[in-house]
Amino acid sequence: MTMQAQRIEISRIRESRGPDLRGLSRAIWQICQAVLVLGLFALLIWRGAQSMEYNWQWYRIQPFFYRVIDGELIWGPLIKGLMVTLQLAALSGVITIAIGLATALMRLSDSISGRVISKVYLEAIRNTPLLVQLFLFYFVLAPIFGIDRFWAGVLCLSFFEGSFASEIIRGGIVGVDRGQYEAADAIGLNRYNKFRHVVIPQSLPMILPPLTGVMISLIKHSAIVSVIAVSELTTAGLNLISDTFMAFEVWFLVAGIYLAVTISLSVGVSVLEVFLNKNKR
Amino acid sequence: MTLIDILAFSAVLGLIVFAVYRVNEVLVYNWDWSRVLSYILRVDDETGQYAANLLLYGLATTLRLAVWGTVLASVFGVVMGLWRTSDNLTLRILSRSYVELIRNLPPLVFIFIFYFFVSSQMFPAMGIDNINPDNAAVDNRVFRLLFGDPQLLPNFLAGALCLALFEGAYITEIVRAGIQSIAKGQWEAARAIGLSRFNVLRDVILPQALRRILPPLAGQFITLIKDSAIVSLISIQELTFMATEVAATTTKVFETWILVGGIYFVLCYSFALFFGTLERRASKTRR
């Protein structure tokens, strides 16, 4: 029986016979079971961590985040790394949207050059690994065009995510009903006004939530530029490990920071999505 | 061809010409494709015949990783996907946290954490490090075809398991979508004729869901080929790792990375075309 059917049935029973004791006891049993199993899990992990031949030094982590010297606050390597990660993500986010928009418009256009160029770009990005793209940008394109490593990383990420962004933007534009275009033409709007007043207001709610998803995956994928030693969060973590040999603590901290950022952004996106859908009636 | 087309194409051409000019005149780069190509196939000094070299070995490992990774990831994915749609709260919590954990972590960070845990803690405990590479059960043709060099077995297993855990999260979502896309009437009808939950899944839901799962699963196989590049960072000796070695030994950085990018492109693109034809044929026969 599916969840929804179950729920409907439960409410029906409740209406006819007062409080549903069986459903309630089942729910309590499920919660107890979850607490038990997850507790056992946590215990096993804790015991496993204790029995490992590893010197856990969680008390040493505070200076990784910040230090106070002479009453002055100095950010630690992890916070500085996070700042660079966010900066990287923001910069390539802007370029990603530009590339995505340009590619989407080129794909939708009638011109041969637009379709050929966008097709070549999309297939090239889709069918090669991000790491190989990064090496191509850093080892091949960067020396040719004289780009430094930070911008090589930014551009590589933008071109990578741009292929996703273009699909999203194209989907949003195509998703607008044909009749809307025809109606806009019929009342005599020109091309600019048609997009400005009819197409974009309708496609934006379709585009925005998945596009913020692209931003989240940008933050995630930005970790890869640590391979070319851009000093972002993962690089900061790697450096800390080679300084302190606290591999586990540092990796858990780095993972925790990424999780905190990406999960809070995803929650933000779903809130935004609800908000946008509400406006749509 | 309109004026805009000509302008756009000449802009691209101009960029290429500029790049070539920079390489030849400013960087004064000596192209030497034969040295890098000899790392795909080399001429054996003794027999005078062609033999596979580093890059081809790497490509073989990449394909093995992709196949084993997909198989393992499908197992994780089906189990977790069933848990995800289960009525049991505990199973739902476990599978949901697995999926969210993997999907919200950078692949790089996941791989490093996995590597530290599995290679330094789990594998020694499981005794995988102690397998004798000269044992006849391990050192034979079939085994070499399936898993590669027995000496690198722990290394290969770490890579395959790591990729499988990673892709498993995505396959979980594919399986969940497949199961949930089956009409509710199918569940109710199956329950109505008295099938148990297990039999409902096995005989009614999964056969229908599988048909919808297969196309995205094929796409995931291509994704896995691409994602396998990242395990080169934990010294799994696949194509990207070998390319790093070749680039370092020959110092022919441009040729190596252009070549390796091309290999990945041909590999993934031909798989994409192949799966596309299969899908079209399947949809034709269904009607």
Image (cartoon, coloured by chain):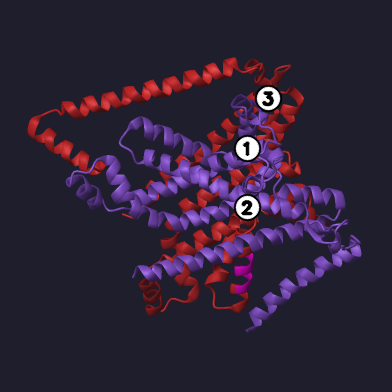
Chain colours: A red, B purple
> What whole-number distance in Å separates the C-alpha atoms at marks 2 and 3?
40 Å
Instruction: Answer with the quarter of the image where residue B259 lies.
Output: bottom right
Q: Which residue does the image show at 32% across and 25% down from the upper left?
A: A31
Instruction: Answer with the quarter of the image where residue A176 lies.
Output: bottom left
| Badge 3 element | helix
Badge 3 density bin: few <14, some 14–19, many ≥20, Cα 10 Å: some
Q: Earlier in the sequence, mark 1 or mark 2?
A: 2
| Badge 2 element | helix
Query: From which residue to which does the magenta span run?
Result: A116-122
Chain letter of mark 2 equals B
Q: Which residue does the image show at 59% across and 15% down from the upper left?
A: A51
Instruction: Answer with the quarter of the image where residue B237 lies.
Output: top right
Question: Are marks 3 and 1 in one subunit?
Answer: no
Measuring from the top left, give residue A248's x and y in whole percent.
64, 25
Which mark is on residue B63? 2
The amino acid type of the residue labelled 3 equals: Phe
> What whole-number distance in Å separates the C-alpha atoms at marks 1 and 2?
15 Å
Query: Residue at label 1?
Result: B158
Residue A46 lies in the magenta-colored region: no
The amino acid type of the residue labelled 2 equals: Leu
